[in-house]
Amino acid sequence: MTNDNTALFDNLVRYEIDLWSAIDKALQAECDLHLTWFEILRLIDAHDGGVRVQDIAAEFAITVGGTSKVVDRIEAAGYCARRANPDDRRSSLVALTPAGREILAAGTVVFDRELDRRIGAVLDDDTIRAVGSALEMLRAAGRSADSSR
């Protein structure tokens, strides 16, 4: 079983790198937008009232300090803005600006096209759902294993 696990690991990691690189390259060429920024903009957009930097960091399993620096850069580009959190004076909420919504819309066209080319054109819908479900189970099991340490 170890060889199968190793092969799965190798394929997952290498495919993730290939996929990330291809989408990042397309987003940069067509929208002058890095995939890291695009992913954060998508998360911010999913939270209508805004999202805390801590929540962004937790979602992507990165440090709060690193997340804050990326959000600072995205804010400096005019794509998001911070405002006081009405529920917690110690934190702020990050929300998209009109320019952020525009670049997210443009990036989404590129993102969706690349996913269709690299996944949808290769796998049928049932397989996509099965792989997605398996990856969700693996992520949940990994988080559970990490929290039990």
Image (cartoon, grey):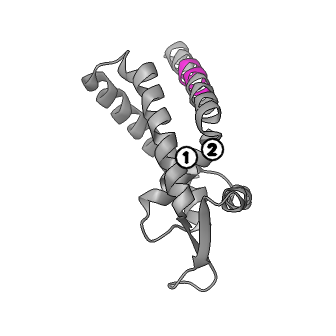
Please state if 131 lies on the left or on the right of 60 as rendered: left
Q: Secondary structure at mark 2?
A: helix
Q: What is the secondary structure assignment of the residue under circle 1?
A: helix
Image label count: 2
Q: Which of these two is toward me, 98 or 76?
A: 98
Residue 145: x and y in percent read 52, 46
> What residue occupies the far left of the structure in this picture?
126
Residue 140 at x, y percent in the picture: 43, 45
Q: Residue at x 63, y 42 (%)?
A: 33
Kindly identify the residue that appears in the image at 55 percent across and 21 percent down.
15
Above or below, 89 relative to 49:
below
Q: Residues within 10 Å of mark 2 (few under 14, many from 20)?
A: few
- Amino acid type at circle 1 is Glu
CA separation, marks 2 and 1? 5 Å
Q: Which mark is residue 65?
A: none
Percent position (x, y) of residue 56? 57, 58
Q: Residue at x 55, y 80 (%)?
A: 85
Up the image or down, 117 lies above or below 70; here it is above
12 magenta-colored: yes
Residue 148 in sight here: no
Q: Nearer the viewer, residue 3 or 64?
A: 64
| Circle 2/circle 1 CB separation < 8 Å | yes
* Residue underneath mark 1: 39
Q: Which residue is mark 2?
A: 36
Task: From this view, report whether residue 34 is shown above or below residue 52.
Answer: above
Residue at position x 59%, y 77% in the image:
83
Magenta span = 9-17
Residue 85 seen in the current view: yes
Amino acid tagged 2:
Thr
Q: Position of residue 116 (x, y in %)?
A: 40, 25
Residue 109 belongs to magenta span? no
